Amino acid sequence: MSSETSPHKPRVAVVFGGRSSEHAISVLTAGAVLRAIDREKYDVLPIGITTDGRWALTADDPERMAIADRQLPSVAALAESTEGAVVLPVDPTNREVVYSEPGSVPKALGEVDVVFPVLHGPYGEDGTLQGLLELSGVPYVGSGVLASAVGQDKDYMKRVFTSFGLPVGPYEVIRPREWEKDPAAARRKIVDFAGEHGWPLFVKPARAGSSMGITKVDDLGGLDEAIEEARRHDPKILVESLLRGREIECGVLEFEDGPRASVPAEIPPVTAHDFYDFEAKYIDSADGIVPAPLSDEQTAKVQELAVAAFEAASCEGLVRADFFLQDNGEFVINEINTLPGFTPISMYPRMWQESGVSYPELIDRLLQAALQRSTGLR
């Protein structure tokens, strides 16, 4: 009998769900990631965060993390208990995860080597979870606290891009205190913006994703309802002018020699929807074109801009960068996503598939990069 022990398999905590309006999309992403992780290479611990913030032990059952009959999944439906909670110690010397239920002795679930956060939106993608993991000393996939926060807040994201000379479109921001102090003045600010840049406008939450809370406003009559809808998701709202052109996306992935860009994709106009909204993305599955039908020069330019955006925001691991190719031939960056969707129809894994990196290889590369990267200042 050999005296050699089997090599340690890194333990991956896949953390998903969360308190944001993108809860269900996170569950979809988690299902796809759990399906793709190489179980011969990694041990996996799924941890779901409910909409009220409870960390729940969930079933490792990707099939239940999918859209069924146009119904979105939730952590509450996957949780093994309605009261039990998972606790990650905020102690760099102890990575052991504990599960407790009222009236029961806490149960140790073992140590976690790396966290794969697949949370979208506030309380997960915005630097909050990343800060917790930094305090805990647990490595994690994706960008750190600053880049995650910048990537979530479209106001500061655009300011960072502008400071690095990246092209952004016209926009206006209404901050919470502006609205609370004088709603009429804040509304006039938007009307003045429309007077300068024209209708239609897009009114959106400054810190949300998956097209949540976004309204295309064609005239003054629809403005108040659009503001209310955006503020339902975020008290800080962003107003953007319509950029006429093609929607182009590009993935960035960190390799040993630095970040590289994937082949770009194009989001074609969606005839059944006013724009590429939530229903088009996740319910009706609008088809992206991969690779995008661009010239070699255009492809090289958008790849260059995607990597430049990744570097400008100090990102790590992965980013999906979204652009408009305007009618004048110039690219404008719309936003970056530091934790883009990994659902079966998501553009990020599709772009890398076309670039020669399979879905399982993509997951493995992200986990290996996280395991080799220390927490703390770097």
Image: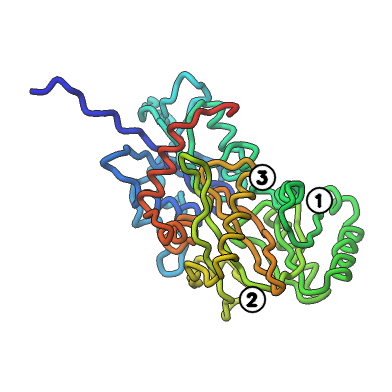
Residue on which the image places disc 3: 312
Taking 239 as reference, is 33 left or right? left
* Residue located beneath label 2 in the image: 274
For the residues carrying marks 1 and 3, which lies nearer the camera in this image? 3
Element under disc 1? loop
- The colour scheme of the drawn protein is rainbow
Q: CA distance from mark 2 to mark 1?
A: 27 Å
Residue drawn at (7%, 23%) of the image: 1
For the residue labelled by badge 2, is the local secondary structure a helix, a strand or a loop?
loop
User: Residue 172: x percent and y percent?
Assistant: 81, 58
Which amino acid type is shown beneath numbered disc 3?
Ala
Query: Is there CB contact under 8 Å for labels 3 and 2?
Result: no
Q: Residues within 10 Å of mark 2 (few under 14, many from 20)?
A: few
Q: Do tag 1 and tag 3 residues touch (Cβ < 8 Å)?
A: no
Which residue position is annotated with label 1? 175
For the residues labelled 1 and 3, the Cα–Cα distance comes to: 24 Å
